[in-house]
Image (tube, helix red, strand yellow):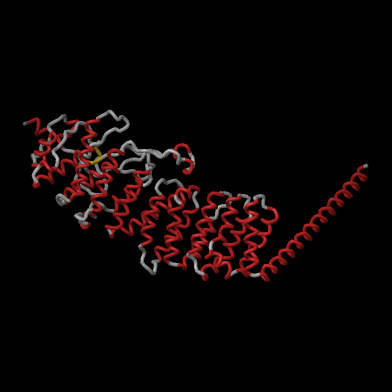
Amino acid sequence: MFNKIIKRGGRKPSKADAIDSGLYGHGPTGNLNSGVVSTSNVVVNHASRTAPATSVVNSVPQPGGAVNDPTPLPSGHIDPVPQFRDVAVSDRQLLFLRKLHICCFQFDFTDTMKSAREKEIKRQTLLELIDFIQSGSGKITESNQEEMIRMISVNIFRCLPPSPYENTGAEMVEMEEEPFADPLWPHLHLVYELLLRYVVSSDTDTKIAKRYIDHSFVLKLLDLFNTDDPREREYLKTILHRIYGKFMVHRPFIRKAINNIFYRFIYETERHSGIGELLEILGSIINGFALPMKEEHKLFLVRALIPLHKPKALALYHQQLSYCIIQFVEKDYKLADTVIRGLLKYWPIINCTKELLFLGEIEEVLEATQSAEFQRCMVPLFRQIGRCLNSSHSQVAERALFLWKNDHIVSLIGQNRNVILPIIFEPLEKNVRSHWNQAIHGLTINVRKMFLEMDFELFEKCQKQHEETEARARELEEQRELTWKRLEEAAEQWKGGEDRITV
């Protein structure tokens, strides 16, 4: 009896301690912490993926808050506990708490044979907790909700392993051959599933849950989007989207936190594994924006979404980014001019792969653009398209010519042909005369024919102006060559005179 008091630190035994003893037994202190497992919040280093190992605290509950007095995570021997159906309804909340304690134990998954029995017990326990939440067998008490969020935090908030491109300096686009698989996934995905079921459950009271799923918890979830495991990012995407939908009080904070991730990615690191998933969430959020659109949302488009076209890794998330951009234009057609000018600002110069993506996005934006907005940006836009027409990369030139296969774009061009044809007439003529690719040559002839049928007089006028421009260019070239010839003759004469004086 004296030894038991010493092990419990002199505190009075409680009912929970009695149940601990019955469920766990009195194993060694180093393994079971005298039957009491700490389930407090974890330490997460937001600045580095290679910080010291995660730890928990054994202190007063501080949901979502700072951590104090870190102690090692519980690990070691685990004894199974009864299933929910084997105990009375009145005892299920206490049993739920004991199962949460078991799930706080951490294991080394680099060795599959180590602690295999304990790993399986934890896995089965997590499955039972998921089934208990999903079935709605009983409403979870507030204290158990707090303990559950603490257990989830212990398991998922951890230091992420370094990405391959962090150590090698390789580009993100080169590291997509073999997706990373987190060795903790056998338990990790069940913890995520438990969190998801808790968030979506109709029994979850948001007034209570928001005390534990708070801003700190959401920030730590967002930090985890940088994991290289696509399965984990998929769970995080679903969970964060559900939190955004259910906890209205967190919506502005979530949008601002995602903004900050984008800013750091664009202007500092250009490396983040979860940009695509975050953009998928935003695509759904943007779709629900009310009209007229708030100035805050327009600033988000200008300051975050459009600059996301700048990083080299654009191809990894361009599909999701393009969807968000199009959502804005469809919501408010007046933003088309802003979007097109933004794309022109970040237009790639030597990266043909990105240029193809830009041309595809320009086509989608133009499909949702009305005539008034088109007129505001058509001059710089078709100057850039003209440069694409003359690209030595055949796919870029071909993609630019394909714009004339879109009926809506052809209609916009036809309405403003007096401005557009003079801009691109020279690039078209240059393609017909000298482009190396025969397919580009044929497509260019088709576009010329389209303009010819659209307005014969304008075409003839542009052709005449082009011939005059070429004639002036030839004259200037002849004058330049004549000037150089005179200079060479003068230099020869000066050289001859200098030689005579020397002699």
The C terminus: image quadrant: top right
Picture coordinates of residue 187, whole percent (x, y): 27, 39
In the shown orientation, is residue 230 left or right of residue 365?
left
The furthest residue to the left: 1
Camera-side residue of 193 and 17: 193
In the shown orientation, is residue 290 left or right of residue 88?
right
In the shown orientation, is residue 50 left or right of residue 267?
left
Up-down relation of residue 136 to residue 375 (above or below): above
The N terminus: image quadrant: top left
Dividing the picture into quadrants, the one containing residue 205 is: bottom left
Residue for point 70% across, 55% down: 433
Picture coordinates of residue 394, whole percent (x, y): 61, 50
Camera-side residue of 350 and 168: 350
Residue for point 47% across, 68% down: 334
Camera-side residue of 274 and 15: 274
Picture coordinates of residue 169, whole percent (x, y): 48, 39
Picture coordinates of residue 215, whole percent (x, y): 29, 53
How many labels sit on residues? 0
In the shown orientation, is residue 394 left or right of residue 211?
right
Residue for point 20% across, 39% down: 125
